[in-house]
Image: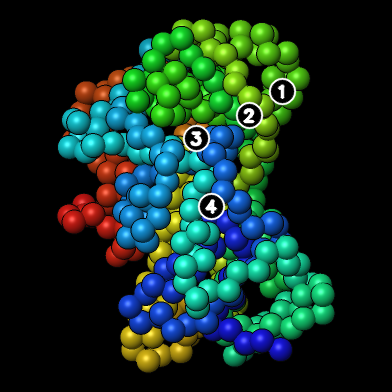
C-alpha cells in the first residue's frame, strides 16, 4: 500500500496546475503528490484549436509564474471585444488600449495547455503521474482516504482532490450533493476561415436562439467559434453539408467578417450548469469543473478552475508554513467559502445574461439595447466591468494578482 500527502484525481489543466503549485510552493516542495487519470497521458502535438479557452490576465499571470506560459506557442491575444444583438441596436465595445492593457485576453488550445503543464510536471520528482488508471472505490476517513484501484492496488492519501471534471467520480463517491439545471442549449465548436481579417477582436452576437462567439486565432483570417443554440438547431447545423453550414454561419454572424468557411471538423456539446452544494468532506475537496460548470458565453470556465487550484494551493502552503495539518477542516472550510462565493457570482451573472437575452418581447429588447448603448458611453462603468472579466479585481489568489488590484 502506497501513502501520499496529496492524491489528485484528474489530469486536466486544473489537476496538473494544482500539482505544479504544490510542488513549487515555498513550504510544500517536500510533499509527496500523486496524480491519477483514467485517460492517456498528453502527447506533444500541434495546436488544432478544436477546443479552446479564453484565458484572462489573472490566469496568464499564474501560468507565467509556473514557467508554463512561455512554452505555449499558440496563445493569440485579442485587443478588442465587440458584443451586439442580432436584431436590435444593442452594442457594446471594449478596447485594451483604452483600458491601459496590452490585451483583453488570450485564446489557448486546451490540449496544448494540458501538454505544456504535463511537460513541466515531469520535471518535478515529487509528482508521480499515473495515466490509464481506473479507481474502483474511495473510502473517506477522518484522517486519510483509501483508494482502491481497478487492478487491486490500494492508495492512501492525507488529502484527496477531485479535479476530475463535470461528471466527477470523486464527487459521486463522496456523495457530495449537487445542484444543476439544463441550459437547454448545445454548443457547436469549430474553426473557421473568414474573408476579412478579425483584427485581434473577439466578437459575440446574441441571436434569438443563443450567443455565437468568434474568437480570433493567430492567423488573422482564422477564428474559433462557439455557437450556443437549441439542441435541435445544433443537431441540424452538425448535419449540414459544408457549403450549407458556411451559408448559415455567415448569415448568423451578419457577415461581420465576410463569408465564413468551415475548417476541419465540427463538434457539439450539451451545456449544463452544475454546482456542488458541498465542496469538501473529511479529507477530500473538489476543484474546477468537479465543483462547478457554467455557460461558456463569457468564456470564464477555465479561469474559474485555475483560480480554484491557486486558492487551494495558497491555503495549503499557509498551513504548512504554520506547521498545521495539511487537510485541516478549518482550512478546507475557508477554501470552500472563498471559491464558492466566486463561483456563485459567476453562475448568477451567466444566468442573468442568458435570461436577459432570452426574451424576444419588444420591451425587454428595447431595455437591453438602451442599457448596452448607455454602458458603452460610460468609461468608468466599462472599466469596472472589464476589471472583473480580466482578473484584475476581486478576491484573487496571491499568485494571480496584478501589482495593483482593484477591490
Label 4 sits on residue: 115
Quick one: label 4 or label 2, which is nearer the N terminus?
4
Quick one: label 1 or label 3, which is nearer the N terminus?
1
* Quadrant where the image shows the C terminus: bottom left
Instruction: Check residue 297 in the rendering and tell me which mark sits there, or answer none.
Output: 3
Mark 2 vs mark 3: give the one in front: 2
Mark 1 vs mark 3: give the one in front: 1
In whole angstroms, how far apart are the C-alphas of marks 4 and 2? 24 Å
Q: Position of residue 88 (x, y in %)?
A: 43, 12
Residue 258 vs residue 167, the one in the foreground:
258
Task: Assign a secondary structure to mark 1.
Answer: helix
Q: Dividing the picture into quarters, in which one does residue 386 lie?
A: top left
CB within 8 Å, label 2 to label 3: no
Q: Dividing the picture into quarters, in which one does residue 176 lie?
A: bottom right
Question: Compared to 227, does 14 lie above or below?
Answer: below
Label 1 sits on residue: 238
Q: Residues within 10 Å of mark 4 (few under 14, many from 20)?
A: many
Amino acid at each position: 500500500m502506497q501513502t501520499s500527502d496529496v492524491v489528485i484525481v484528474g489530469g486536466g489543466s486544473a489537476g496538473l496546475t494544482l500539482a505544479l503549485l504544490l510542488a513549487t510552493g515555498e513550504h510544500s516542495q517536500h510533499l509527496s503528490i500523486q496524480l491519477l487519470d483514467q485517460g492517456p497521458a498528453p502527447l506533444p502535438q500541434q495546436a488544432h484549436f478544436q477546443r479552446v479557452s479564453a484565458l484572462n490576465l489573472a490566469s496568464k499571470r499564474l501560468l507565467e509564474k509556473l514557467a508554463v506560459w512561455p512554452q505555449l506557442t499558440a496563445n493569440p491575444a485579442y485587443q478588442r471585444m465587440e458584443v451586439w444583438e442580432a436584431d436590435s441596436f444593442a452594442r457594446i465595445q471594449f478596447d485594451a488600449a483604452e483600458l491601459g492593457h496590452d490585451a483583453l485576453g488570450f485564446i489557448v488550445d486546451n490540449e496544448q495547455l494540458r501538454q505544456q503543464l504535463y511537460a513541466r510536471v515531469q520535471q518535478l520528482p515529487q509528482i508521480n503521474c499515473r495515466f490509464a488508471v481506473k479507481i474502483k472505490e474511495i473510502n473517506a476517513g477522518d484522517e486519510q482516504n483509501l483508494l482502491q484501484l481497478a487492478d487491486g492496488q490500494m492508495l492512501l492519501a492525507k488529502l484527496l482532490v477531485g479535479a476530475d471534471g463535470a461528471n466527477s467520480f470523486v464527487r459521486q463517491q463522496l456523495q457530495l450533493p449537487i445542484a444543476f439545471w439544463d441550459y437547454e442549449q448545445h454548443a457547436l465548436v469549430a474553426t473557421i476561415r473568414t474573408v476579412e481579417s478579425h483584427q485581434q477582436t473577439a466578437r459575440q452576437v446574441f441571436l434569438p436562439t443563443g450567443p455565437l462567439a468568434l474568437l480570433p486565432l493567430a492567423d488573422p483570417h482564422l477564428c474559433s467559434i462557439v455557437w450556443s443554440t437549441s439542441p435541435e438547431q445544433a443537431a441540424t447545423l452538425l448535419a449540414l453539408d459544408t457549403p450549407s453550414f458556411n451559408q448559415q454561419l455567415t448569415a448568423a454572424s451578419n457577415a461581420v467578417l465576410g463569408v465564413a468557411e468551415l475548417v476541419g471538423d465540427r463538434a457539439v456539446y450539451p451545456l449544463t450548469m452544475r454546482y456542488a452544494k458541498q465542496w469538501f468532506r473529511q479529507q477530500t475537496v473538489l476543484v474546477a469543473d468537479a465543483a462547478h460548470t457554467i455557460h461558456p458565453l463569457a468564456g470564464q470556465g477555465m479561469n474559474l478552475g485555475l483560480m480554484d487550484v491557486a486558492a487551494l494551493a495558497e491555503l495549503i502552503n499557509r498551513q504548512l508554513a504554520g506547521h498545521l495539518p495539511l487537510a485541516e477542516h478549518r482550512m478546507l472550510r475557508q477554501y470552500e467559502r472563498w471559491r464558492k462565493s466566486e463561483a456563485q457570482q459567476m453562475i448568477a451573472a451567466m444566468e442573468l445574461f442568458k435570461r436577459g437575452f432570452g426574451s424576444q418581447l419588444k420591451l425587454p429588447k428595447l431595455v437591453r439595447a438602451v442599457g448596452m448603448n448607455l454602458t458603452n458611453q460610460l468609461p468608468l462603468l466599462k472599466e469596472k466591468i472589464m476589471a472583473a472579466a480580466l482578473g484584475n479585481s476581486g478576491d484573487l489568489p496571491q499568485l494571480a494578482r496584478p501589482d495593483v488590484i482593484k477591490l
